[in-house]
Amino acid sequence: MADVKICGLRDKAQLAAAIETGARYVGFVFFPKSPRAVTPDEAAQLVTEVPVGVARVGLFVNPDDALLTEVLDKAPLDIIQLHGKESPERVSEVRALTGLPVMKAIGVSGPDDLGQLTEYGLVADMLLVDAKAPKDAVLPGGNGLAFDWRLLVGRRWLRPWMLAGGLTPDNVAEAVRLTGAPVVDVSSGVESAPGVKDPDRIRDFIDAARG
């Protein structure tokens, strides 16, 4: 049984579908190249709809201080998710700047990538274990790709963590069973088209993740 983060929510109907079916985390993307991107002003309208007990997560890709400040001035968040090539030093800087917990996404394609989870576990508050994006990918995540979950069997990290990457209503139960992930994160796996969340798929995903 795992909690669920629904990422890349863009409007109130999508957000309501995630909350009403039991998502514990809701994610807003501040990366213009993504089909799931929202502006700070759009996010400001959405975060007011999130009830107490559901964490508001902002996804950023190599953000500068100005963007972080602009977003937080308009749209209060609970967690900053860094999904780019931010260094451990930058993770620490973002924590200090925002005063918020920082979750660092780590792309995994093989055993050689697992060391980063230990490295970033020293500075981040949470870890997101995601499938590594292809070298020519425009997006660092949300590509619908999975990795070999057996790489995570029996492993423990320094920080709380989430599992992402190619999860769908059909495979999330198996992913949780294999990895023991306490939280699973989904975006494209509950969409009917890029950036368009499907309420039925959200419900089916959460039901499957919770077993």
Image (cartoon, helix red, strand yellow):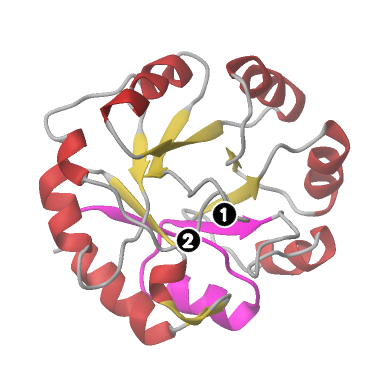
Q: Which mark is residue 137?
A: 1
Kind of element beneath mark 2: loop
Q: Quadrant of residue 82?
A: top right
Q: Residue drawn at (34%, 40%), measured in percent from left and top?
A: 109
Q: In the image, is 47 to the left or to the right of 166?
A: right
Task: Locate residue 97, reporting x and y percent.
Answer: 76, 25
| Image-quadrant location for residue 108 | top left
The three-letter amino acid code for the residue at tag 1 is Ala
Mark 1 and mark 2: span between their CA atoms? 8 Å
Residue 43, x across and y down, in percent: 73, 63
Q: Which residue is mark 2?
A: 143
Vertical position of residue 19 compared to residue 199: above or below? above
Q: Which residues are magenta?
A: 1-29
Mark 1 or 2 closer to N-term? 1
Q: Is residue 210 visible?
A: no
Question: Magenta span has 21?
Answer: yes
Q: Residue at x 81, y 58 (%)?
A: 40
